[in-house]
Image (cartoon, helix red, strand yellow):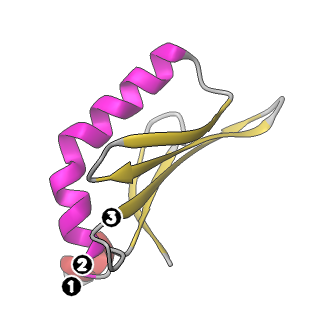
């Protein structure tokens, strides 16, 4: 199951998995693109290991890396509580 975390002003969606038994969390970034359909990238926390990067520029990736780095503690917490909406009791 993937839980919504953040939608950016360019319609980029950042979602995350539940915490897996090994303590890791998958974070998925996806942006709609008129030409390619979607650009996407995957990050695994807590290692901040990025894989499967498709369509993003280096500048865009630096932005996403900063967002994930600055919010990793929240993503890790929400991954154990059923996502941000569950943690906020919505």
Mark 3 or 1, closer to the camera: 3
If you read the primary sequence from the N terminus, does the residue marked by circle 2 or circle 3 appear first?
3
Q: Is residue 47 magenta?
A: no
Determine which quarter of the picture holds residue 18. bottom left
The residue to which callout 2 is attached is: 80
Residue at point 35% right, 32% down? 65
The residue to which callout 1 is attached is: 89
SS category of the residue bearing label 3 = loop
Query: Could you tell me residue 64's position as x and y percent?
Result: 40, 33
In the rendered view of the protein, which quadrant contains the C terminus?
bottom left
Per the rendering, the mark at residue 24 is 3
**Disc 2 + disc 1, Cβ < 8 Å:** no
Q: Is residue 65 magenta?
A: yes
Q: Nearer the viewer, residue 44 or 81?
A: 44
Mark 2 or 1, closer to the camera: 2
Magenta part of the chain: 58-81
User: Where 30 falls versus 73 (above or below)?
Assistant: above
By secondary structure, the bulk of the magenta-drawn segment is best described as: helix
């Amino acid at each position: 199951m993937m839980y919504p975390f953040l939608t950016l002003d360019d319609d980029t969606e950042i979602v995350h998995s539940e915490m897996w038994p090994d303590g890791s969390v998958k974070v998925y970034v996806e942006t709609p693109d008129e030409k390619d359909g979607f650009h996407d990238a995957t990050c695994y926390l807590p290692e901040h290991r990025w894989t499967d990067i498709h369509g993003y520029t280096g500048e865009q990736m630096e932005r996403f890396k900063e967002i994930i780095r600055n919010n990793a503690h929240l993503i890790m917490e929400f991954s154990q509580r059923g996502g941000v909406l569950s943690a906020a009791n919505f």
